[in-house]
Image: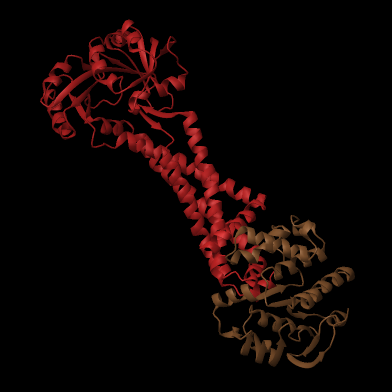
């Protein structure tokens, strides 16, 4: 069963009198447990598509169903609740809250869930353990390296156990070694926990870590590659 | 509701981990709340001293058209005439000597009272905290000093105390619910008349304090007293004690009226400080808020965090300012005395609680507009900011 079904997805922006067509009639299906890389040149609509899948932006037309939920029909409040329970989002620039420690950043999304303090503690500890940063739980973002910050961001994204993990150029701001660590982590989440992942990337080598690569150009899907096995 | 409560630590960390911004804002709010509390305490003191309560039963008989204890001279013999007027329970002649007739923060007021009437009347309403009434009765130059005056002048039983040419020996210190008592020294009437006799005022008193049967008798008895002496050489003006204080304190009332403007301006400053701090905080955190919304925070939850932060700023600054004013007023023991009557500026918990509550409320109101803006901003716009 497809985890994500996009049909005739369109997104237009208006700049003065000019209408910019960022996405044009995109159809896309992603199976549960899939690992998809979205590639394409700047302005091709990769991040816009990712934002629409995350429910943080609204399409001009078309539909998006995630696990059978038609998210384009949800109101603001319902969409926020849906994001909280379904989506984990990893940003290129980590976007940790600067005044919170690694632990508190990872705990943030759990504040929206009816969990006891002890349960929150258990989940945050597990997530930090998974990304290999349990020992850095009390560090503020400025006390961490870029790679460590991104791993904390991944812990924050997975701590609610979302069905869908979306990553916008997760290695775009990292050195080679840190990027490899982050990609190893995402691949492990997909392989061992069956996490559905959609990732935007510019880097062909990073895209090879996914099972499927979708190329966009000028707002349309132009090519898709499916691999039986991801690159190590 | 529980979601909102779970976000409280997040808001708290935002405040304490930005110590410079929070410290400066809280300090500003504290200063403004201090001013507001101080002015309100002053207004409260004036109100308590000048507004008649339903239980008021005291009249003050003063010389007509005289406004200072030096000028109000009445024959002591009036006491027996006043005592015969229907509705009068007692009439105590009082000689008042002050070291300064104008408004001042350190006026010493001597009240000369007859021993018998004083013990039967006034001493039933006061509580001796040091020394004794027997010591006062045993010496002609003895004085019983109100607690506020004793504290201000650092007086203890056994001390000698001289002011306005009157030299007394401190027999005791008493606490009284009446502000007029707390700031005076009660001495024997003959002693004070003798001390003031250099001007030939023996047998002359400043005023009579008249106790009436009940509150309803105040006006008719006052009219009867003034009528009894209307054609005398020394005509009188008789008023309820609160009205007498209000007339004597008219200058202070005008100042307090002006000071209330300062109080309201202080509240406006609290509002402006919080509004400015929160508006800047929300502007700086556009991206943070977009991240929170991406994580699933609703606009309502986001607005709550902003308003809670503003309320916490108001609450903490208000608490510091109100506590500061409370402490300063308690330590300083400020009394305005004019024409022999006192107005006490005291630190009251009601004023402190009101000041804290208003500061917190202003915080919530000041945070409302930025909270609304944060809640309505599109996530994608927010992520592009900064």
Q: Colour of chain A?
A: brown
Residue A207 point in image, percent of width and height: 83, 82
The picture quadrant where one finds residue B236 is top left
Q: Nearer the viewer, residue A143 or B381?
A: A143
Q: Is residue B12 left or right of residue B51?
A: right
Q: Nearer the viewer, residue B368 or A126?
A: A126
For the question of whether residue B386 can be seen, the reply is: no
Residue A69 point in image, percent of width and height: 59, 84
Q: Colour of chain B?
A: red
- Residue visible at 68% across and 88% down? A2
Residue B9 point in image, percent of width and height: 60, 56
Q: Is residue A194 above or below residue A127?
A: below
Q: Is residue B25 left or right of residue A136?
A: left
Q: Nearer the viewer, residue B346 or B289?
A: B289
Q: Is residue A190 above or below residue B41?
A: below
Rendered image coloring scheme: by chain
- Residue visible at 56% across and 52% down? B313
Residue B138 point in image, percent of width and height: 32, 5
Q: Is residue B18 above or below residue B223?
A: below
- Residue visible at 73% across and 65% down? A127
The picture quadrant where one finds residue A3 is bottom right
The C terminus of chain B appears in which quarter of the rendering?
A: bottom right
């Amino acid at each position: 069963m497809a985890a994500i079904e996009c049909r005739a997805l369109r997104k237009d922006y208006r700049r003065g009198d000019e209408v910019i067509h960022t996405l044009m009639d995109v159809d896309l299906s992603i199976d549960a447990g899939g690992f998809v890389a979205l590639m394409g040149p700047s302005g091709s609509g990769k991040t816009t598509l990712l934002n629409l899948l995350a429910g943080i932006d609204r399409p001009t037309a078309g539909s998006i169903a995630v696990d059978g939920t038609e998210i384009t029909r949800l109101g603001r409040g319902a969409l926020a609740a849906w994001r909280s329970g379904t989506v984990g989002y990893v940003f290129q620039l980590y976007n940790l809250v600067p005044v919170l420690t690694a632990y508190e950043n990872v705990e943030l999304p759990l504040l929206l869930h009816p969990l006891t303090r002890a349960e929150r503690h258990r989940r945050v500890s597990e997530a930090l353990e998974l990304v290999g940063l349990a020992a850095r739980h009390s560090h503020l973002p400025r006390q961490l390296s870029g790679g460590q910050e991104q791993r904390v961001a991944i812990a924050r994204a997975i701590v609610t156990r979302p069905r869908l993990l979306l990553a916008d150029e997760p290695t775009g701001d990292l050195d080679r070694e840190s990027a490899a660590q982050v990609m190893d982590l995402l691949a492990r989440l997909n392989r061992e926990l069956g996490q559905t992942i959609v990732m935007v990337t510019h880097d062909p080598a990073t895209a090879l870590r996914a099972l499927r690569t979708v190329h966009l150009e000028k707002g349309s899907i132009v090519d898709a590659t499916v691999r039986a096995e991801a690159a190590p | 509701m529980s979601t909102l409560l779970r976000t409280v630590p997040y808001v708290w960390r935002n405040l304490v981990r930005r110590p410079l911004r929070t410290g400066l804002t809280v300090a500003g709010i504290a200063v403004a709340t201090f001013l507001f509390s101080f002015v309100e305490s002053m207004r409260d003191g004036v109100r308590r001293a000048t507004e008649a309560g339903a239980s008021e039963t005291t009249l003050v008989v003063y010389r007509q058209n005289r406004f200072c204890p030096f000028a109000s001279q009445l024959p002591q013999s009036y006491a027996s005439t006043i005592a015969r007027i229907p509705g009068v329970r007692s009439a105590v002649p009082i000689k008042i000597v002050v070291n300064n007739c104008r408004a001042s923060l350190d006026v010493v007021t001597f009240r000369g009272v007859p021993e018998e009437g004083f013990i039967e009347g006034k001493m039933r309403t006061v509580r001796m905290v040091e020394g004794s009434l027997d010591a006062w009765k045993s010496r002609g130059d003895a004085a019983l000093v109100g607690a506020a005056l004793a504290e201000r002048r650092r007086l203890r039983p056994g001390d000698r105390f001289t002011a306005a040419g009157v030299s007394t020996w401190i027999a005791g210190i008493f606490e009284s619910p009446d502000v007029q008592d707390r700031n005076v020294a009660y001495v024997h009437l003959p002693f004070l008349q003798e001390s003031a006799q250099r001007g030939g005022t023996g047998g002359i008193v400043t005023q009579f304090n008249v106790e009436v049967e009940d509150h309803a008798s105040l006006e008719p008895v006052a009219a009867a007293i003034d009528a009894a002496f209307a054609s005398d050489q020394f005509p009188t003006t008789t008023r309820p004690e609160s009205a007498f204080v209000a007339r004597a304190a008219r200058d202070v009332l005008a100042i307090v009226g002006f000071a209330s403007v300062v109080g309201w301006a202080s509240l406006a400053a609290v509002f402006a400080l919080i509004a400015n701090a929160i508006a800047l905080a929300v502007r700086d955190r556009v991206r943070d808020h977009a991240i929170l919304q991406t994580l699933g925070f609703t606009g309502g939850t986001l607005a709550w965090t902003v308003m809670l932060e503003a309320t916490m700023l108001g609450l903490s600054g208000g608490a510091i300012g109100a506590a500061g004013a409370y402490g300063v007023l308690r330590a300083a023991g400020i009394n305005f005395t004019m024409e022999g009557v006192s107005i006490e500026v005291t630190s009251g918990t009601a004023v402190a609680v009101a000041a804290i509550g208003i500061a917190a409320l202003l915080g919530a109101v000041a945070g409302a507009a930025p909270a609304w803006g944060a809640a309505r901003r599109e996530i994608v716009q927010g992520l592009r900011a900064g």
